[in-house]
Amino acid sequence: MARVVVDVMLKPEILDPQGQAVQRALPRLGFDGIADVRQGKRFELEVEGPVDDAALARIHEMAETFLANTVIEDFVVKVES
Amino acid sequence: MTTRIGVVTFPGTLDDRDSLRAVRLAGAEPVSLWHRDKDLKQVDAVVLAGGFSYGDYLRAGAISRFSPVMETVIDQARAGLPVLGICNGFQILTESHLLPGAMLRNNHLHFICRDQKLRVENAETAWTADYETGQEISVPLKNIDGRYVADERVLDELEAEGRVAFRYLDGNPNGSLRDIAGITNAEGNVVGLMPHPEHAVEPLIGTGRTDGLAFFTSVIKKLVTA
């Protein structure tokens, strides 16, 4: 089965306090040099059948209507080989 | 004829009982609606109550928005049915695109539970007509995903059209843009807010204020005179 990954991230202009909290914790744990952290979501879809243009179009529609809220989030669809 | 107001229960809804009670105390007939049932039982208005429907999985309100009952609620709301979304209900309304913008995690990342002062900015909606514009009220606020966001263009549009219905007073509790606590659609039949008017309807409960009752009396009056 082919795997398609949908990465969902908050739009750059949207404040991400969870990412900020992670970033602030890093020096305390000895991880220096990280200027910024943004937290997102990753969906791994196991696709039945071929991942052709039609399947990708459906996944794009799924991401746009459901997996991401495009008012606040951007998404990227990637086919994993 | 008694006004019938429906309250939707999703799996994970918490405040449906209080909302039904508020409806009754305001003088209408409360009607329970079920998330898997498309039938709105001929109610005259709908309340989407607070809680954590579908566990807030994916995003608060994101899964509820696709439930059978919401298909009908969305259709009817577009046709003028008064709909009030409280807390999780507000999140469902933004996910449904019946109201613009979105709700995100509070900027300080903490769950808040306290009484919250609000200013009524628009007393002409179906759910606010029994208030006066500029009136200050206090009702409970309890959430972790209460930060209202929208892009600048949408915010300017909301302000210009008087569609900011409620604003937080005495400090912004969650980082909501422009201190927005609640908004309305252009027609004034769909209103959403994060604080909980249904918890402030009886003198015996909480701070003893009944500042929330006017939401429910507003819509009854609106429906009776319609």
Image: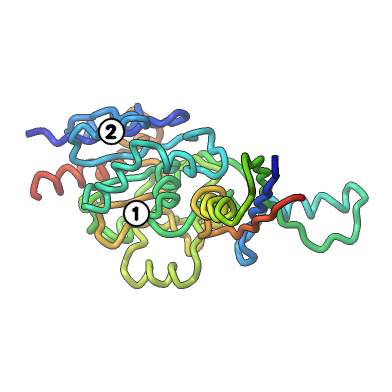
Left or right side of B117 for B143: right
Looking at the picture, tell me which residue is in the foreground, B4 or A49: A49
Mark 2 or 1: the one toward you: 2
* Marks 2 and 1 share the same chain: yes
Q: Label 2 neighbourhood size at 10 Å, few (<14), some (14-19), many (20+)?
A: many
**Residue type at numbered disc 2:** Ala
Which label number is shown at residue B121? none
| Secondary structure under the numbered disc 1 in the rendered image | strand
Secondary structure at badge 2 equals helix
The circle drawn on residue B136 is 1
The mark total stands at 2
Quarter of image, res B169: bottom left
Q: Is residue B106 visible?
A: yes
Image location of residue B198, percent across then percent down: 34, 37
Q: What x and y, as percent, mark residue B146? A: 51, 49
Q: Is residue B7 above or below residue B78?
A: above
Residue B87 in the image: state x and y as whole percent.
43, 43
